[in-house]
Image (tube, rainbow, N blue to C red):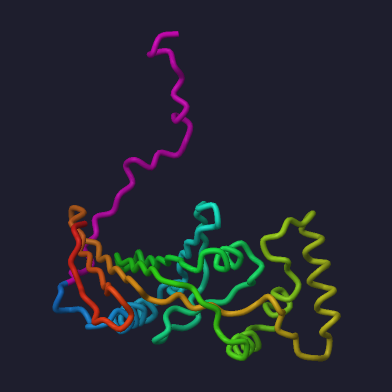
Amino acid sequence: MSADAVPDNDSARVDTSALRVDYDRAELHRADLAPEPLEQFDRWLGEAIRSGLPEPNAMSLATVDAEGAPSVRVVLLKGHDDRGLRFFTNADSAKGREFSQRPQAAACFLWKELHRQVRVRGRVTPIGREESRRYFHSRPRGSQIAAAASPQSQPITDRAALEHLFDATEERFSGRDVELPDVWGGFVLSIERLELWQGRRSRLHDRFVYSRPRPDAPWSIERLAP
């Protein structure tokens, strides 16, 4: 078969090669930045919230297992303070098991309507049981029951089996508070490195990174090439 006769297997697929947006919402200068990354992150997150973006606290969370295979999923940021970025999950989930093997992770926030992205890298540590309990009981009751019922990341036979687990758990806690599951709780991703990305025309984006050699050292801020 000649090269011209080889079928184009991509011809029936969605073509993404011509999809592009020119970013022109804003500029980012060194003088604009807060001296510490947590303050700067808080500024940008606040602007994303005030802009009315859908779920501005959604972050892609990347982890690595014991064999070095990466995984990424979207989780919701539920707080940030001097410890880092706080989120909650099942410790028996894939990411929970990966935290126990390699307690490091990276997160990415994309606020595409603002042409902005924030990347964070650091260590993951569990938060205290009481703090996890307070947040757990602040959730809607249905979410509490789902967390107690679901064997997260484990294979199940079908949707009906999952709904049966939910119904059984709902009945078990009928008329009383849902107990915090032993395997469910919060984690903190420390900020060891934080990068800001502001989209600019012609792909000449503004990028700045906060980093420091050790936790007690002052933060340095560098501009990166796009």
Image quarter of residue 123 = bottom left
Residue 83 drawn above or below residue 209: below
Q: Nearer the viewer, residue 112 or 34?
A: 34
On screen, residue 9 versus residue 114, left or right, reads: right
Residue at (36, 78) in percent of width and height = 45
- Magenta stretch prevailing secondary structure: loop
Residue at (42, 80) in percent of width and height = 84
Residue at (44, 16) in percent of width and height = 6
In the image, residue 2 lies in the stretch drawn in magenta: yes
Residue 226 drawn above or below residue 29: above
In the rendered image, residue 67, in percent from the top left (x then y), is placed at: 54, 52
In the rendered image, residue 50, in percent from the top left (x then y), is placed at: 36, 81
Residue 111 drawn above or below residue 179: above
How many numbered callouts? Answer: 0
In the image, residue 78 lies in the stretch drawn in magenta: no
In the rendered image, residue 33, in percent from the top left (x then y), is placed at: 21, 79
The image quadrant where one finds the C terminus is bottom left
Q: Nearer the viewer, residue 22 or 76?
A: 76
Image quarter of residue 31 = bottom left
Image quarter of residue 158 = bottom right
Q: Which residues are magenta?
A: 1-28
On screen, residue 142 versus residue 127, left or right, reads: right
In the rendered image, residue 132, in percent from the top left (x then y), is placed at: 60, 85
The image quadrant where one finds the N terminus is top left
On screen, residue 160 versus residue 35, left or right, reads: right
